[in-house]
């Protein structure tokens, strides 16, 4: 008899196909608040989920046999870790599997936003390009010689720092603690980092403690020539404060791959040409998806065979 695996969401088809070769799949569940579980869910020992989806006591009460939760990506911020620990449920994620993809996307977003590539592209497409208006275009401050402040110098943030160094930028950071081995400028809080930086890059690990860490004071500290990039979680940035800062020209612009209430995006952001927006696609590369898929398959197999797990979350 094949083991059953409960899919918390509509997983990518290559992962579904690979799992289906060896296991009996149940689900997927409705994404935000599942109320009716597939028959047999109460016997499932393994669940596969993704970041940003809640796994709380109400759901766990319906899964008495659950022993292991595998996160396809890196996020696990909406899993009730305390409740899972009480029940002896193990949790693992994909570690740094998507870090190269997210870091390169974050760097591309910074480059595109600061250099206004989308605006220039539209100018050419509209047929309004002429020698006269090109000469009248405002000069970009560029990136060389400027400062990037990285909030969260982990697997993604460290790679962004390397990219920034290659662009001749000065790198600073903040996070839970200073890293003695880091060659970069340390700030002991996010507001100090924003004051120091020209670009504020958000690559911090998602969690309740980071909600609205980027507030009005931080945005004011970043200043009218500052640029914000967020590839972490939308709720790390107070979107109302961001809208207000842009409306009062207290910020040069922003690059956002994540939003506070996805897929809803405030109209004020959608209508602001200074804001570069993408639909939460930073890890969407073949390389990253293959690595996350392989990590998931490896861990599921290891669990059922009684072997150690890769990237297990300790708490």
Image (cartoon, rainbow, N blue to C red):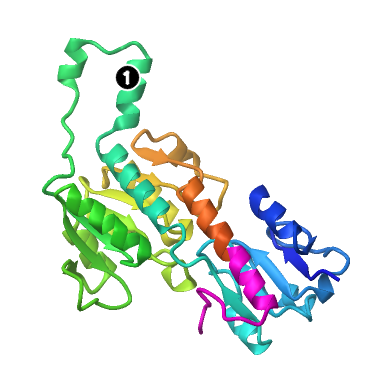
**Image coordinates for residue 259, horizontal then vertical, percent:** 49, 51
In percent of the image, x 37 and y 14: which residue is there?
126
Taking the image as drawn, is residue 71 in sight?
no
Q: Is 298 covered by the magenta stretch?
A: yes
115 displayed left or right of 289:
left
Query: Mark 1: few, some, or many residues within 10 Å (few <14, many ≥20)?
Result: some
Q: Mark 1 points at which residue?
A: 123
**Image coordinates for residue 142, horizontal then vertical, percent:** 17, 40
In this orientation, which residue lies closer to the viewer: 42 or 286?
286
Determine whether the residue tagged by mark 1 lies in a helix, strand or loop. helix
Q: Is 152 covered by the magenta stretch?
A: no
**Image coordinates for residue 266, horizontal then vertical, percent:** 50, 44
In percent of the image, x 30 and y 31: which residue is there?
117
* Residue 109 falls in image quadrant: top left
142 displayed left or right of 294:
left
In magenta, the rendered stretch is 296-315
In this orientation, which residue lies closer to the viewer: 219 or 259?
259
Taking the image as drawn, is residue 287 in sight?
yes
Q: In this view, does 146 lie above or below 186?
A: above
**Image coordinates for residue 46, horizontal then vertical, percent:** 71, 72
Q: Is residue 69 above or below residue 33?
A: below
């Amino acid at each position: 008899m094949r083991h059953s695996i409960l899919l918390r969401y509509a997983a990518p088809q290559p992962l579904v196909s690979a799992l289906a070769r060896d296991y009996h799949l149940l689900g997927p569940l409705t994404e935000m608040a599942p109320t009716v579980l597939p028959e047999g869910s109460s016997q499932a020992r393994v669940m596969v989920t993704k970041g940003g989806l809640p796994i709380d006591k109400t759901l766990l009460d319906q899964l008495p046999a659950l022993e292991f939760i595998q996160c396809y990506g890196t996020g696990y911020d909406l899993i009730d870790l305390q409740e899972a620990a009480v029940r002896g449920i193990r949790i693992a994620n994909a570690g740094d599997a998507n870090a190269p993809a997210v870091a390169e996307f974050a760097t591309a977003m910074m480059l595109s936003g600061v250099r206004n590539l989308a605006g220039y592209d539209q100018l050419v497409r509209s047929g309004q390009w002429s020698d006269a208006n090109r000469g009248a275009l405002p000069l970009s401050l560029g990136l060389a010689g400027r400062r990037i402040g990285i909030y969260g110098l982990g697997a993604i943030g460290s790679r962004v720092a390397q990219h920034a160094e290659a662009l001749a930028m000065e790198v600073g950071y903040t996070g839970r603690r200073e890293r003695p081995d880091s060659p970069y400028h340390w700030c002991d809080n996010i507001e100090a980092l924003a004051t120091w930086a020209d670009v504020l890059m958000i690559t911090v690990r998602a969690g309740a403690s980071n909600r609205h860490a980027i507030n009005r004071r931080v945005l004011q500290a970043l200043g009218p020539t500052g640029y914000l990039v967020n590839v972490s979680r939308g709720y790390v940035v107070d979107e109302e404060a961001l809208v207000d800062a842009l409306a009062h020209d207290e910020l040069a612009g922003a690059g956002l791959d994540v939003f506070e209430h996805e897929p809803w995006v405030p109209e004020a952001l959608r209508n602001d040409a200074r804001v570069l927006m993408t639909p939460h696609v930073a890890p969407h590369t073949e390389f990253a998806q293959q690595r996350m898929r392989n990590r998931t398959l490896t861990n599921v197999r290891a669990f059922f065979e009684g072997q150690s797990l890769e990237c297990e979350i300790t708490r």
